[in-house]
Image (cartoon, coloured by chain):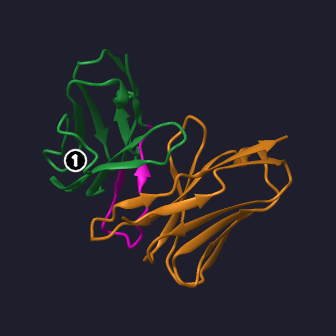
Chain colours: A orange, B green
Amino acid sequence: GQQVMQIPQYQHVQEGEDFTTYCNSSTTLSNIQWYKQRPGGHPVFLIQLVKSGEVKKQKRLTFQFGEAKKNSSLHITATQTTDVGTYFCAGPGAGNNRKLIWGLGTSLAVNP
Amino acid sequence: DTGVSQNPRHKITKRGQNVTFRCDPISEHNRLYWYRQTLGQGPEFLTYFQNEAQLEKSRLLSDRFSAERPKGSFSTLEIQRTEQGDSAMYLCASSSDLTRSYEQYFGPGTRLTVT
């Protein structure tokens, strides 16, 4: 079945260092979404990418969608302690139900 | 707009008991999703409603699980004869067909502990 994989599973950085998480889908995606879940919280929508090769920025966060629309990345420049959490990518499953297939997430820890 | 709400936030129950959770989506959202999440995992899809119609149910969901959305507004998720393996966070999310975006808005979740 359709799968979405993320690497790394965990990342520990010093505050100020950069961070990147990668997402790969077993199938071509019409779009990909990124969510952030703080410890003890629920997933919160960050962004949706739709176009092949699309790059979007949100302050220190840069999101990319691959040319083949099967992979994506999230890069955080100069991490801060507020960036701590788990970052999930998710892509729509087959069919018209808008069900999302989720990666396992990358947990980011930031040392002050 | 008060966002997605879920009740209760926490539930502790003994094995074999039945539990019911409620989700109130964002009022204008016609799509509603239930997920289950365990520690270190991503949300696992359970079931999905478009308005009051339940359009898909995960094959992972046993017959002990049932969900309803009787008037296309709030939804309930019932687990009968709970087992320890049912312990998890149960998340509800909603979205709208009126936007081209697939973004889903999540509630705070109901954490179930089966003893």
Q: Is residue A62 above or below residue B108?
A: below
Whether residue B108 sits left or right of residue B65 in the image: it is right
Q: Please name the predominant secondary structure of the magenta segment in the image.
A: loop
Residue occupying image coordinates x 66% and y 55% = A8
Residue at which label 1 appears: B73
Residue occupying image coordinates x 59% and y 79% = A66
Residue A26 horizontal/vertical position (percent): 47, 71
| B26 or A107: nearer the viewer | A107
* Amino acid at pointer 1: Ser
Residue occupying image coordinates x 29% and y 18% = B15
Residue A109 horizontal/vertical position (percent): 73, 43
Residue A65 horizontal/vertical position (percent): 58, 76
| A3 or A63: nearer the viewer | A3
Membership of A38 in magenta stretch: no
- Image quarter where the C terminus of chain A lies is top right
Magenta stretch, residue numbers: B93-108
Whether residue A77 sits left or right of residue B99 in the image: it is right
Membership of B99 in magenta stretch: yes
- Image quarter where the N terminus of chain A lies is bottom left
Residue occupying image coordinates x 38% and y 44% = B4
Chain letter of disc 1 in the image: B
